[in-house]
Every structure is written in C-alpha cells, then in structure tokens.
Image (cartoon, grey):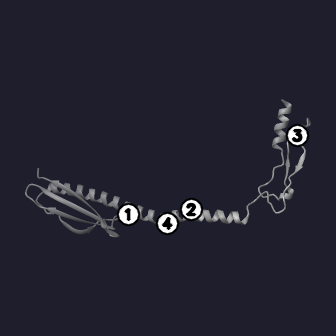
Amino acid sequence: MRRFLKEIKAFFSLNRAAPLEKPQDFNRRIPGNSPDGVYPVREVKRDKGNSLTGFTFIEVLMACLILAFALIPIMLWVPVSIQSKARTEQKTAGIFLAQAKIEELRAKVRDNFGNNFSVDSASFSPPYQDYRYTIVDDVYTYLKTISVQVWHVGRPQDNTTLYAQMAPR
C-alpha cells in the first residue's frame, strides 16, 4: 500500500510543461522501476525548427479563415431574424387589440343594437398609439355584422381583420 501511495504521489509531482514553455526547458519525468520512487529525468529531443508548444502563424491564420467563413451566414441571418421578430410582435399585438375591440363592441351592441358603430381610421390609446383600427358595421334589422381591422402604422399592409355577428335579444 505504501508503494502504491508513493507512486501516486510521484505521479502528481511530475514536472509538467506550461502551455507555452520553451522547448529547450521542456523536461519530462519518465516513470521508472526504482524502489525509492525517484524517477530519472529524460531530455526531450527535438529537431531544429520544430516547436513542441504553441501554434504557427499559418495555423492561426487558417483557423481565423475557417471561423470567418462559418460566421458569415450567421451574421447575414441576424438582421432577418430581428425584422421577423418585430413583424411577429406587431402582428400578435394587432390580433389582441382587435379581439379587445370586438369584445368592447359586443357590450355596446348588446345595450344599443340599433346604433351604427362604424369608425374610420382611429388610433388606440397609449401604449398602443402606433396601431390604427377601422370598424365597419353592416346594419341589418335582425343580424349585425361588425368587422374590426387593425394595423401598425409602420406596416399597414400587415393588417388583421376580425368579424363578429350579433343578433338582438
């Protein structure tokens, strides 16, 4: 057991090279079979001009080129993703605003069925002042069809239209 512990201690006490240690100072202890736990030191031989640690300029340059070619498609995708996110947020807010306006109109129509609730291009109150809506009320005697169209001022072509039909009670 003592010998095993000595070997473990000796293994962890080996001189290890730092990542950018000079090759001429690079010594490695090689495990031996000596009973006293002292290991011989062997000089690492190398050819002139070869480096044992670090990267060459060409290797770094090639890594940078590969990284640049990999990042170009990602960087081209980022602005498209941001625009898509903004459009989706505007569309979602428009749908919720249209639903809220339909519910508001249902309560008004229930109280005053005979009134005309048509509105031409009005804006919502803050924080949704950038959204506009139009209400078209098809007034019939027994069935009222109301359509609410909501859009963002930045993208009026992306509008949301919801319909509701109500009958008198």
Question: Is tag 4's residue or tag 3's residue first in the polypeptide sequence?
Answer: 3
Measured Cα–Cα span from mark 2 to mark 4: 11 Å
Camera-near label (2 vs 4) is 2
Q: Which residue is mark 1?
A: 87
Q: Amino acid at mark 4?
A: Leu
Mark number displayed over residue 76: 4
Provide the secondary structure element on which disc 1 rests: helix
Provide the secondary structure element on which disc 3 rests: loop
Which of the pair 80/30 is nearer the observer?
30
Q: Amino acid at mark 3?
A: Gly
Question: Is tag 2's residue or tag 4's residue first in the polypeptide sequence?
Answer: 2
Which of the pair 103/77 is nearer the observer?
77
In the rendered image, residue 4, in percent from the top left (x then y), is placed at 83, 33
Q: Amino acid at mark 1?
A: Arg
166 above or below 135? above
Measured Cα–Cα span from mark 4 to mark 3: 58 Å
Q: Which residue is mark 3?
A: 32
Camera-near label (3 vs 1) is 3
In the rendered image, residue 50, in percent from the top left (x then y), is placed at 80, 60
Q: Which residue is mark 2?
A: 70
In the image: residue 125, left or right of residue 66: left
Question: Is tag 3's residue or tag 2's residue first in the polypeptide sequence?
Answer: 3
Q: How many marks?
A: 4
Q: Amino acid at mark 2?
A: Ala
Q: Are marks 3 and 2 in contact (CB under 8 Å)?
A: no
Question: Callout 2: few (<14), some (14-19), or many (20+) C-alpha neighbours within 10 Å?
Answer: few
Instruction: Identify the residue shown where x is 18% and y is 57%.
Output: 108
